[in-house]
Amino acid sequence: MATYSPTPTDIAQALYTLSMIQPSDPVGYMDTGASGHMEQPGMTSPSIFNTCTNKQIIVGNSTTIPVIGQGNKTLPPPFPPLKLNNILYAPNLIKNLISVRRLTTDNLLSIEFDPFGFLVKDLKTKEPILRCNSSGDLYPLTTNCIKPPSKPIALAAITQDRWHPRLGHPVNRTCWELQTKTKYAQRNKTEFPNQKIHPKQV
């Protein structure tokens, strides 16, 4: 009777082979651990400006992926025109990675992550720029991301007679009655014009 003994497989080699046969994924994924942007060349990449590079990408298991060049690009519509600078192009990547650190510093942004996706905001104005939802394990930058609506501004004309009571301030009639009924007010007849604000005593 013949016995079967499986040959141990080199996991790193298996993953490398898997990456070679997987179809290209044009989506970029947000990565808080990446020191720079990384992308498969020829997908959405512009011309590569630095092909004389000896750089390599070191992945989690300490293996390296060769880099064939560097380049810059701006996100195309429907995205806001955010800059991706010094992208490392490596043909053996499985996923395109967007460095959160580089994206926020190059574009002066803040990014808030939550269980349902992430929100990109202008660092100075705190205005939302982009919202991307995700139901999976990663945070993809996909074309179905939306620009959040600006904060609505509701303005209404409210008279002082209506506004001050809502704030707990006495109205003109109350002030007049207090003025005429108290001894202090009789000695010091002070007018309570509409323009003055009289804070509520606590």
Image (cartoon, grey):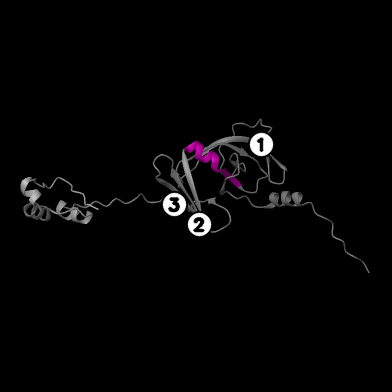
Residue on which disc 2 sits = 116
Above/below status of 37 relative to 3: above
Q: Residues within 10 Å of mark 2 (few under 14, many from 20)?
A: few
Marks 1 and 3: which is nearer the front? 3
Residue on which disc 3 sits = 146
Horizontally, residue 140 falls left or right of residue 8, namely left
In space, the residues marked 1 and 3 are separated at their CA atoms by 33 Å
The image position of residue 32, as x and y in percent, is: 57, 45
Marks 2 and 1: which is nearer the front? 2
The image position of residue 106, as x and y in percent, is: 50, 36
Marks 3 and 2: which is nearer the front? 2
- Residue drawn at x 54%, y 59% as measured from the top left: 135
Disc 3 residue type?
Ile
In space, the residues marked 2 and 1 are separated at their CA atoms by 35 Å
Q: Which residues are magenta?
A: 96-107
The first of marks 3 and 2 along the sequence is: 2
Residue on which disc 1 sits = 68
Instruction: Give the structural element (helix, strand or loop) at label 1.
Output: loop
Q: Residues within 10 Å of mark 1 (few under 14, many from 20)?
A: some
